[in-house]
Image: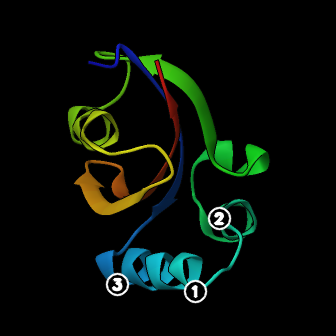
Amino acid sequence: MATKVHAAHILVNSQLRAQQLIGRIRNGESFEALAKEYSTCPSRDNGGDLGYFERGMMVKPLEDAAFNGNVGEIVGPVKTDFGYHVIKIIAME
């Protein structure tokens, strides 16, 4: 079982926008470029990269989605108090 996840995310204000971005990513657009353009989180400057995190470091819905996903997977939309997240799972340890 993974103890750390390296993930990136795109935070937007609507479920529809999150779903649209997921479609664009699955059609080959760059996750990082879309994060820089659309994310409302300061991590957008790094293409949405959140780095490695352990359980208890992120809001629970985002954390649960990241730890339950697979490396290389795009997960979401995940709703939190901050908005809707599109999550890219980069690595697990």
Question: What residue would you read off at disc 2?
Answer: 31
Please indicate whether residue 44 sits to the left or right of residue 81 in the image: right
Residue 39 in percent (x, y) is at 59, 61
Q: Secondary structure at mark 3?
A: helix
Residue type at the position of mark 3: Leu
The residue at 37%/45% (across/down) is: 70
Please name the amino acid that badge 1 sits on: Asn
Name the image quarter holding the N terminus. Answer: top left
Q: Which residue is mark 3?
A: 16
Query: Position of 34 compared to 93: left or right?
Result: right
- On the image, numbered disc 1 is attached to which residue? 27
**Does residue 42 appear to the left or right of 54 in the view shown?**
right
Percent position of residue 86, x then y: 43, 60
Mark 3 or 2: in front is 2
Q: Residues within 10 Å of mark 2 (few under 14, many from 20)?
A: many
Relative depth, front residue between 9 and 80? 9
Distance from disc 3 to disc 2, alpha carbons, whole Å, reads: 17 Å
In this view, 54 is above or below 44: above
Q: Amino acid at mark 2?
A: Phe
> Looking at the image, which residue is at 26% across and 48% down?
81
Mark 1–mark 2 Cα distance, whole angstroms, equals 11 Å
Residue 77 image position (x, y, % from top left): 31, 65
Q: Earlier in the sequence, mark 3 or mark 2?
A: 3
Label at residue 88:
none
Q: Are marks 3 and 2 in contact (CB under 8 Å)?
A: no
Q: Earlier in the sequence, mark 1 or mark 3?
A: 3
Q: Is residue 90 above or below residue 51?
A: below
Numbered disc 2: secondary structure: helix
Rendering quarter of residue 17: bottom left
Q: Nearer the viewer, residue 90 or 10?
A: 90
